[in-house]
Amino acid sequence: MSLRVERAGLLTTVQDLGRHGFQHLGVMVNGAMDELSHRMANALVGNAEDDATLELTLSGPTLRLGCDAVIAVCGADMDARVDGQPLPSWRPARVPAGARLEFGRATRGARAYLAMAGGFDLPPVMGSRSTAQRGGFGGFRGRALRRGDVIPLRSPEEAHTPRWVRLLSRARRGVAYPSWSVAHTEVPMPREGQVIRAVPGRHWQTFTLKTREQFAGVPYRVLLDSDRMGYRLEGLALAAPRGGDVLSEGMATGAVQVPPSGQPIVLMADRATTGGYPVLAVVAAVDLPLMAQLAPGDQLRFELITVLESHALLAARERQLARTAEALRAQLA
């Protein structure tokens, strides 16, 4: 059982929910940039939410299935097709052996996630199958996929996936999928001028009042040299805080650093574990998936909220996801 890469796409990597518990050793967390789309794709094929998926960035790959498979695609719209026929996203689909699965350029959002029932038969490294490109480990040979790669798969039976997945895998020949799908409102995609909520960062008080007011009031644009490590933004330059740079210290995902140029950098999934630029704010965890779906050239604005508001928003999102997961179990039993 395998998946062959015929065209790699711009950046296709194996990702799960990240490599936790090793940051004190300087090991990056990595993991899916948009964890909501990743979790939903896994739920649709009966996998655990921390099973690995393929993360497709901006322009997707072309893949050849070496076996019958149940798959799901969530996240950005990349015009997924099976043997030239459109493949609906946000729902499970049975795809026959030998089928050609092709993805185009993202027309909304930046990243799509492909889950395979049973998951990828790749060894975990430090508890995770996520690709650590800078370290050269995890995922598939520690790198992005290339043409000619053959990725081994686990069978749904081996992964003890639910009965509905096994039934769908025995469906009529060709592509088969249900008429329903997960509502796109469950995992929203960004809009032009997307508002990204953030909480005050560790060095918030060291910035002038004027800088703090500017931060939440001006638009920024995502620059082309943004990547999984961090999003570089362009807009009104923010004045450096009193005292300039700070001692190197631990960094959180979503930290908004202000380098000497005054143009903010938002740290993302492949961020370093430490950093020395002052942190003005931190993107609220509930909005990290939206941030991850912004593409170069997209505009955004920051809205300041409190830590308590951030916690409440995240808790509300998790409750909604739990309800969706329960509805899926009832639908797919």
Image (cartoon, rainbow, N blue to C red):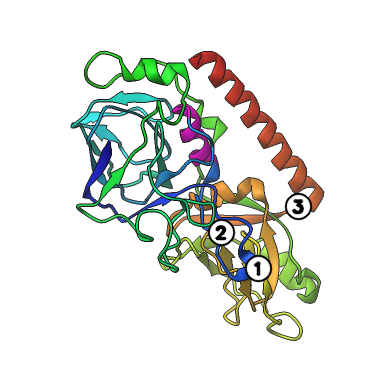
Q: Residue at x 31, y 50 (%)?
A: 59
Q: Is residue 216 visible?
A: no
Q: Residues within 10 Å of mark 1 (few under 14, many from 20)?
A: few
Secondary structure mostly taken by the magenta-highlighted segment of the chain: helix
Residue at the spot of label 1: 24
- The circle on residue 224 is none
Q: Position of residue 276 (x, y in %)?
A: 64, 79
Local secondary structure at mark 2: loop
What residue sits 35% from the left and 59% below the top?
A: 141
Res. 140 image quadrant = bottom left
Residue under numbered circle 2: 29
Q: Amino acid at mark 1?
A: His
User: Is 313 rendered above or below residue 12?
Assistant: above
Q: Name the residue tied to disc 3.
A: 305
Q: Mark 3 is on which residue type?
A: Ile
Quadrant of the rendering where the N terminus is positioned = top left
Q: Residue at x 38, y 42 (%)?
A: 120
Q: CA distance from mark 2 to mark 1?
A: 11 Å
Mark 1, mark 3: which one is toward the viewer?
A: 1
Kindly indicate whether the residue at mark 3 contacts the one at mark 1 (C-beta within 8 angstroms). no
x then y, percent, for residue 73: 39, 35
Choose top left, top right, bottom left or bottom right for residue 248. bottom right
Q: Position of residue 86 (x, y in %)?
A: 27, 29
* Circle 2: residue type: Val
Closer mark to the observer between disc 2 and disc 1: 1
| Alpha carbon separation for disc pair 1 and 3 | 29 Å
Element at label 1 = helix
Tag 3's secondary structure?
A: loop
- The region drawn magenta spans 36-46
What x and y, as percent, mark residue 145?
Answer: 30, 54
Rendered view: 44 above or below 51:
above
Work out whether 251 lies above or below 283: below
